[in-house]
Image: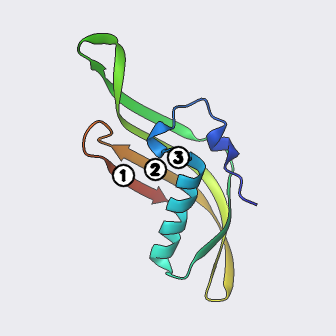
Amino acid sequence: MNDLSILTASDHWLGWLGDDPAQAVHSEIEGLLRQQAPTAKLEWLRLLEKPCFLTGGRKVPDSPQQIVVIRAAFAVPFELEVTSGGKSDRLCGVFSWVASGLDEERHDQLYWA
């Protein structure tokens, strides 16, 4: 029942999320759940609307028509089902992933509300 197609159907550049952006998002959300409950299992995840994207860069000095991406982010509403300790819960919220230092030492921040 996973549906992250809204993310991957986008024309926006997602290279900063790796070869499989949908799997990266799924894994990170499951990781956030496990920080709260170590036995948490993400049963399914659906993205509900087109993500909002932000991408920033700097011009390449020798080639002013090109830029180097230095930061990228997106936010997307979601719903999911998680099980832990014999209980099942449905959660809704907004997941945000912000990455800076894409041209140097990368730093990622994940948020959900």
Q: Position of residue 78 (x, y in %)?
A: 64, 56
* Mark 1 lies on residue: 108
Q: Secondary structure at mark 2?
A: strand
**At 60% from the left edge and 50% from the top edge, which residue is drawn?**
22
Q: Secondary structure at mark 3?
A: strand
* Mark 3 lies on residue: 75
Closer to the chain start, of discs 3 and 2, is 3
**Label 3 Cα neighbours within 10 Å, binned few <14 / some 14-19 / many ≥20:** some
**At 69% from the left edge and 80% from the top edge, which residue is drawn?**
88
Give the left or right position of residue 98, taking residue 7 as reference.
left
Spatial CA span between label 2 and label 1: 7 Å
The reply to whether callout 2 and callout 1 are in contact (CB within 8 Å) is yes
| Three-letter code for the amino acid on which mark 3 is drawn | Ala
Q: Which mark is residue 97?
A: 2
Q: Position of residue 3 (x, y in %)?
A: 71, 53
| Three-letter code for the amino acid on which mark 1 is drawn | Asp
Kindly tell me whether residue 50 is visible in this rendering: no
The one nearer the camera, 18 or 99, is: 18
* Residue 69 lies in quadrant: top left
Closer to the chain start, of discs 2 and 1, is 2
Kindly tell me whether residue 55 is visible in this rendering: yes
**Label 2 Cα neighbours within 10 Å, binned few <14 / some 14-19 / many ≥20:** some
In which quadrant of the rendered image does the N terminus lie?
Answer: bottom right
Q: Secondary structure at mark 1?
A: strand
**At 36% from the left edge and 52% from the top edge, which residue is drawn?**
108
Establish if 41 lies above or below 92. below
**Label 1 Cα neighbours within 10 Å, binned few <14 / some 14-19 / many ≥20:** few
Q: Residue furthest right?
A: 1
